[in-house]
Image (tube, rainbow, N blue to C red):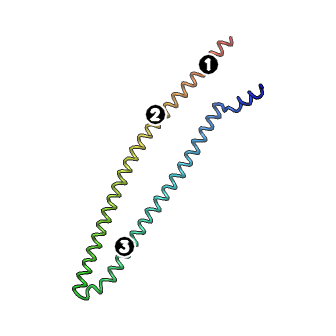
Amino acid sequence: QVESLRRQIDDVPGRAELSQYQKRFIELYNQVASTHRETQQFYNMYNTLADSNTYMEKELSLLNSMVDNMAPAFANSANLEQYIQQLENIVEGIRQNKAKLERRCTEEKAEKHGLTEELSRLQELNRQYAKTVHLLSQEIMKNEALHEKIAQMRGQ
């Protein structure tokens, strides 16, 4: 039974082991966070490039359409009026698209501002946490020193 109790006591990790576990978990967390951040950046870059590609394809298609329809449009005044109306519709579509993109940009800037404020708040909270942990570790060391003194006094 004594051996069984010793094994149970040995199975409980000590302060040093717990400290090592904590450090390793922090290292793993940082590694996973770094990989996640990198993956997120790749997704953002892909989405940005895909959007740019889409807009360039639309622009190319629009320019080709304008060039193809230009010669027939100048054939008579009715075709010219229709061609000018089409160009005005295209310009209006471009304005609407621009307004939509500007709204999206404004929304993303507002979101970025909110996230920056949240980051600042969390960084301050992290500083307070680190300070509290440091103070707690100092108090633990004082407590252990006092326990050692008490044990020495009892031993005398």
List the residue tagged with mark 3.
59
Q: Is residue 96 above or below residue 11?
A: below
Q: Secondary structure at mark 3?
A: helix
> Which of marks 1 and 2 precedes in the sequence?
2
Question: In what quadrant of the picture does the C terminus appear?
Answer: top right
Q: Secondary structure at mark 1?
A: helix
Residue found at the very far top of the displayed protein: 156
Residue 148 spot, x, y in % from top left: 63, 19
Q: Secondary structure at mark 2?
A: helix
Q: CA distance from mark 2 to mark 1?
A: 28 Å
Q: CA distance from mark 2 to mark 3?
A: 53 Å
Residue sitting at 50 percent across and 34 percent down? Answer: 130
Q: Is residue 88 above or below residue 69?
A: above
> Which of marks 3 and 1 precedes in the sequence?
3
List the residue tagged with mark 1.
147
Question: Which label is found at residue 55?
Answer: none
Q: CA distance from mark 1 to mark 3?
A: 78 Å
Residue sitting at 62 percent across and 34 percent down? Answer: 18
**Which mark is nearer the camera, 2 or 3?**
3
Residue 70 spot, x, y in % from top left: 30, 83
Residue 116 spot, x, y in % from top left: 40, 46
Residue sitting at 35 percent across and 57 percent down? Answer: 105
Residue found at the very far left of the displayed protein: 77
Residue 151 placement, left or right of 130: right
Q: Amino acid at mark 1?
A: His
Residue found at the very far bottom of the displayed protein: 75
Callout 1 crowding tier (Cα within 10 Å): few <14, some 14–19, many ≥20: few
